[in-house]
Image (tube, grey):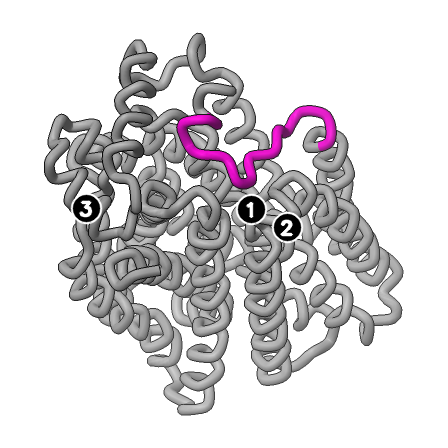
Amino acid sequence: MNATLFRGVLVGALAGLLFGFDTAVIAGTTEGIRVAFGLDATGVGVTVSSALWGTLAGALLAGIPGDRYGARASLSVIALLYLVSGIGCLLAVNWPMLLIMRVLAGFAVGASSVLAPVYIAEIAPAERRGMMVGAFQLNVVLGILVAYLSNYFVSGLHLGALDWHVKFGVTALPAVLLLVMMRTIPDSPRWLFAKGREAEAAAVLGKLGNADVAGEMAVWRRAEEQSHAPRLSWKRHHRPMLLAIAIAAFNQLSGINAILYYLNDIFAAAGFTGVSADRQAIVIGACNLLFTGLALTVIDRIGRKTLLLIGSVGLTAALAGVATIFGSDTHQGWLLYLLIGFIAFFAFSQGAVIWVYISEIFPTDVRARGQSLGSSVHWFMDAVIAFGFPLAAAHARALPFWLFGAMMALQFVVVLAFFPETKRRSLEAIGEAM
């Protein structure tokens, strides 16, 4: 781990922190927004999901500039979008302006979820790629925890009607740092090579600490010669496409983001006060960070598939417990412990694996677009579930948790039967096997 490699992973991880911060900050603002604009359950659902439709657009569109201009240049533009959206939400004077700024923030989040893991995967050595790309997810959950801490701190300032404005506005601070840090990292050597800039690619490989630059580039050259077309196509790439779609869909069908977005509302429905709900959210966020970090210490040894299987079992049990509490309206004291268990199993499995796995399974010439496909499915499902969760919960509070639990049981079967293991294999070797 030399300075150039460290900065590259750090910048990609910082994009993850903004990803987590911007997606989770909404949890502490729903009540303020509801009061400020007189929203019903549908209006709150529209507000929360607005960013996610922007995220879907960002994920769909990011692969094209990522492949054409490189992840580094594209991430610089994304950092600027984070900054503008944070300031815009701070100054929002009406509901339409807030929705527009949240869509813009979502666009940046979606693009980050495509390009930051791709960038890290392409600069990381194979034997440590899982841990290094996983640093992106670690910072996503760190961003979630920072959002909960920030919300708790701002709530303590008793700002009244300004409370939700300031909570959103804080996101502009890490955006400035990302914008500055982007100037300290090189382009991906694999992207430079794919663009015919072999001398520059060799120079960057040397800076990244590669001991056999000529040998590495010879492997890339053979992989390039075997590539027939730089387009993502069903005929050539149907297997990695199906794997990306499956892991992305199941990630959201666990209910993770719906629970994170509506965490304060879930605790309120179980009888907790607003202040205690903020504190419980911090506990959940800290657990998320702890178990994501734990997963990164074993992901390159235990493997991606094994972690997914472990998580499927634990998530099914935890969700069944939460559903039972809301269905029976008893034992509310167990809710925090079950949600901690849910977060722990998610962070140790899907949370740590998803961006690593999708960034590995596509060939280099279509990796950004393959990542875009998986990310787009992830955010489409997220938007639909985030909009539908309050409506389903209003009908029957236990219903969404039973559905999420059933999906995790199905995930176990699908992963066991169809998912290949990718640990400790070069990106080129994985691409040839797909």
* Rendered location of residue 164, percent (x, y): 38, 74
Q: What residue is shown with label 1?
A: 353
Which picture quadrant has residue 93?
bottom left
Point out the stretch of residues depicted in magenta. 416-430
Residue 434 visible (yes or no): no
* Rendered location of residue 250, percent (x, y): 62, 38
Q: Is residue 7 above or below residue 403?
A: below
Q: Which mark is residue 204?
A: 3
* Rendered location of residue 104, percent (x, y): 27, 51
Neighbour class for label 2 at 10 Å: few (<14), some, many (≥20)?
many
Give whichever of 82, 45 is nearer the camera.
82
Contact between marks 2 and 3 (CB within 8 A): the answer is no
Which picture quadrant has residue 25?
bottom left
Q: Tag 3 or tag 2, which sits nearer the N-term?
A: 3
Q: Is residue 91 above or below residue 308?
A: below
The residue drawn where x is 52% and y is 51% is 42
Q: Secondary structure at mark 3?
A: helix
Q: Secondary structure at mark 1?
A: helix
Q: What residue is shown with label 2?
A: 349
User: Given the image, on which type of amino acid does mark 1 rest?
Assistant: Val
